Structure formats: structure tokens, C-alpha cells
Image (cartoon, rainbow, N blue to C red):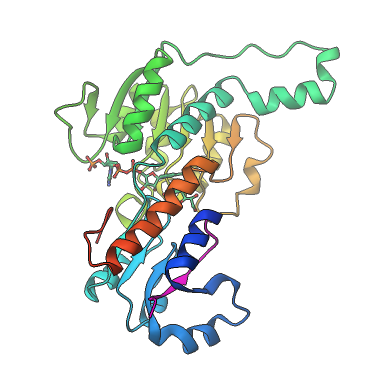
């Protein structure tokens, strides 16, 4: 008998094929009546493939043994309830570091040089009548990274290739890292030109970047959020961008995705991106493969590859 697995959202095609070959898969997100599907198959489901697993879903699955989440961030999984039930949780670390770091540098250049705006300038025929405004460069500037973890370190490497100076903030200093450490985020925001967020979401980091931090970053400073929307006080961000008290923002993530504050749409000092840090074929396929590999390992009685609980 193949283990029964509940899939919570679409996964890359190779991962869906592998899941179908190894398990009996129930597609929750496709079900016309989710409650009916859960009532029918819930008592037999032993694994979950995918993210967005709340307490109610875990409680509907009395035989659940493992949640193999898709994504390195697992803030959409109720790990407290999982832990209390001895349910294992896995994520997909490392395989997405390069893709996210590349997008981060891309967003920084896009904001510094106003690339989306310059593209529109050409398409709309405005170049025929005017020169594009002069802007700024990344080289020689200081980048403050909030969360010098797996992805943060890749961003730091690439920023140095852009001839930037790198400093960082986290809960602790990392003795092996060559960058200057700030224990106080507001102090770091005051001292840097660019602030990149790449720390986990969840309660511990909620509104870590508050009005004070954004104000310290200031009218010449730029915020790049590739972490989670919850890290930032979004209302304060919008207000400070509108008033020019913050120089600019490049945002891949938002508080209530896919809803984005409409006030941002009209702002010239903003670059917007639809949560696509890991959004390449190569990376998403590797993430999907890791989801399947963790489920395979669990049901074969082998050690999990990337367990977080
Ligand atoms: P990681 O290796 O665990 O690194 C996280 C870093 O954040 C660590 O250096 C940690 O340092 C720091 N941190 C943790 N809690 C903190 C806190 N309360 N205050 C300040 N710093 C804190 O994680 P990762 O693999 O680099 O991924 C980081 C996050 O990026 C994910 O959790 C996810 O939310 C986000 N992400 C976004 C995308 C996207 O598509 N935009 C893609 C992938 C990941 P300390 O322990 O020293 O505090
Ligand atoms: C998303 C991410 O998981 O890994 C993470 O934490 O934020 C992304 O890779 C991915 O976009 C799927 O929703």
C-alpha cells in the first residue's frame, strides 16, 4: 500500500510526477469541496507535500506524520501544532540561494537605475523628446543585510562584486564572517545606503523594520525586501516613500500577497516584483525534488534531508 499524501498547492511538474509515482496523492487545492475531500481521505493521509499548513488542516489529519513544505521559509506551516503532535516538518534550503541572491542584486540595480521606468520611457516614445534623468550607482555604497544566513551570504558575495561594502544585522555576531556586525538594526539603518531584508518571517521578526528603522535609513536610503512582507511596517513604508523621507524600495514580498498596496503603484521610487525570488525552472525543480526526497526518506525510515521539526 502506497502512503497517502495531501498536496496543498501546485508543484513543479517533475515533482508532481514523482509524487504520483511514489504515493497516492490527493490534491487539496483542486478539490471542488475541500471539506468533503478532507472528510473522505483525511483519516488516511500520512504526509503533506506543500506549504500553507495551518492548525485546522493538521487537526483534520489524525495520521499525519510529515509535512514536506515547499520553500525554505516555513512561516506558513504551524510548527507549534506539528511539534506537539510529533509530526516532522521539512523545508527546501540551499537549492534556492543563488536564484534569490541574483534577484536581489537585480532589484537593487533596477531601483538604482529605475530600469522599469526607463523601459516605459523608451516604449512610450518619451526618449524622442527628452533625456533620461541621471541616477546613482551601487559601487562605493554600503549595504546592510538583515539576516546573514544561507541566502544573505550569497547576496553579500554578489554585493562585493558590485564593489559595495557589506555590513549585517542578526540576533548574534558571526565570528567567522568578515563583515561589520550591528546588534542594533536602527544604528545599521542610519549607517547604510541600502538595507536588504533576508531573515525569516513569523512572529519573531514581525515589523522588525518599523517606522524608526525606515526613518533612520532616510531620504537617500533604499530598502529591498526579499524576505517576507511581515518584516516591514508596510503602512509606514508607503507613507515614508510618498513623502520622500525614504529614498526608495524594491519589494519582492508583501504583507498580504498577492494584494499589494495600491498607493505603491503610482510611486516612481519603487520597483515591484511578484514574490519571484526562487522563480526559475532550475530552482523550483530542485525545490520540488527536495520535497519528494524528504517524503521518500521519511516513508523509507531513513533520515530526513532537511528537517526543521
Ligand atoms: P537562514 O539561513 O536561516 O538565514 C536567516 C538569517 O536570519 C540568519 O542569519 C539569522 O541570523 C537571521 N535571523 C533570524 N531571526 C532573526 C531575527 N529575529 N532578527 C534578525 N535576524 C534574524 O535562512 P535563508 O535560507 O537564508 O532564508 C531566509 C528567508 O528568506 C526565508 O526564511 C524566507 O522567508 C526568505 N526567502 C524569500 C524568498 C523569495 O522568493 N523572496 C525565497 C527564499 C527565501 P541569527 O540567527 O544570527 O539571527
Ligand atoms: C516560495 C520562498 O516558497 O523559499 C521561500 O521561502 O519564499 C519562495 O521560494 C516560493 O515562491 C513558493 O511559494
Q: Quadrant of residue 61?
A: bottom left
Is residue 34 rendered to the left or right of residue 161? right
Is residue 290 rendered to the left or right of residue 177? right
Q: Is residue 131 above or below residue 307?
A: above
Query: Magenta stretch?
Result: 1-11
**x%, y% of residue 231?**
40, 47
Residue at image location 36% in from the left, 81% down from the top: 59
**x%, y% of residue 158?**
40, 22
The answer to if 2 sits in the magenta stretch is: yes
Q: Main secondary structure of the magenta part?
A: loop
Is residue 125 rendered to the left or right of residue 142? right
Any part of residue 233 in sight: no
Q: Is residue 229 above or below residue 159?
A: below
Which quadrant is the C terminus positioned in? Answer: bottom left
**x%, y% of residue 106?**
53, 27
The answer to if 159 sits in the magenta stretch is: no
Q: Quadrant of residue 269?
A: top right
Q: Is residue 11 above or below residue 101?
A: below
Q: Is residue 16 above or below residue 234?
A: below
Residue at image location 45% in from the left, 27% down from the top: 218
Residue at image location 59% in from the left, 33% down from the top: 270
Number of marks in picture: 0
Which quadrant is the N terminus positioned in? Answer: bottom left
Q: Quadrant of residue 125?
A: top right
Residue at image location 42% in from the left, 35% down from the top: 214
Any part of residue 290 in sight: yes
Amino acid at each position: 500500500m502506497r502512503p497517502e499524501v495531501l498536496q496543498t498547492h501546485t508543484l513543479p511538474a517533475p515533482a508532481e510526477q514523482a509524487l504520483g509515482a511514489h504515493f497516492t496523492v490527493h490534491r487539496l487545492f483542486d478539490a471542488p469541496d475541500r471539506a468533503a475531500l478532507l472528510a473522505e481521505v483525511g483519516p488516511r493521509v500520512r504526509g503533506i507535500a506543500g506549504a500553507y499548513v495551518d492548525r485546522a488542516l493538521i487537526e483534520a489529519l489524525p495520521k499525519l506524520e510529515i509535512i514536506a513544505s515547499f520553500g525554505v521559509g516555513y512561516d506558513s506551516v504551524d510548527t507549534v501544532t506539528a511539534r506537539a503532535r510529533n509530526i516532522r516538518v521539512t523545508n527546501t534550503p540551499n537549492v534556492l540561494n543563488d536564484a534569490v541572491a541574483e534577484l536581489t542584486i537585480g532589484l537593487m540595480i533596477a531601483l538604482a537605475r529605475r530600469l522599469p521606468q526607463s523601459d516605459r520611457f523608451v516604449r512610450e516614445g518619451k526618449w524622442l523628446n527628452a533625456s533620461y534623468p541621471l541616477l546613482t550607482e551601487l559601487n562605493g555604497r554600503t549595504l546592510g543585510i538583515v539576516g546573514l544566513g544561507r541566502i544573505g551570504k550569497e547576496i553579500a558575495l554578489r554585493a562585493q562584486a558590485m564593489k559595495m561594502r557589506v555590513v549585517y544585522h542578526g540576533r548574534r555576531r558571526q565570528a567567522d564572517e568578515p563583515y561589520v556586525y550591528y546588534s542594533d538594526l536602527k544604528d545599521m539603518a542610519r549607517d547604510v545606503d541600502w538595507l536588504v531584508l533576508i531573515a525569516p518571517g513569523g512572529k519573531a521578526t514581525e515589523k522588525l523594520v518599523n517606522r524608526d528603522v525606515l526613518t533612520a535609513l532616510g531620504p537617500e536610503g533604499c530598502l529591498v525586501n526579499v524576505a517576507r512582507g511581515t518584516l516591514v511596517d508596510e503602512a509606514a513604508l508607503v507613507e515614508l516613500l510618498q513623502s520622500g523621507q525614504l529614498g526608495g524600495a524594491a519589494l519582492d514580498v508583501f504583507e498580504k500577497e498577492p494584494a499589494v498596496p495600491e498607493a505603491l503603484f503610482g510611486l516612481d521610487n519603487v520597483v515591484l516584483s511578484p514574490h519571484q525570488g526562487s522563480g526559475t525552472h532550475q530552482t523550483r525543480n530542485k525545490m520540488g525534488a527536495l520535497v519528494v526526497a524528504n517524503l521518500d526518506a521519511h516513508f523509507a525510515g531513513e533520515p530526513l534531508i532537511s528537517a526543521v521539526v
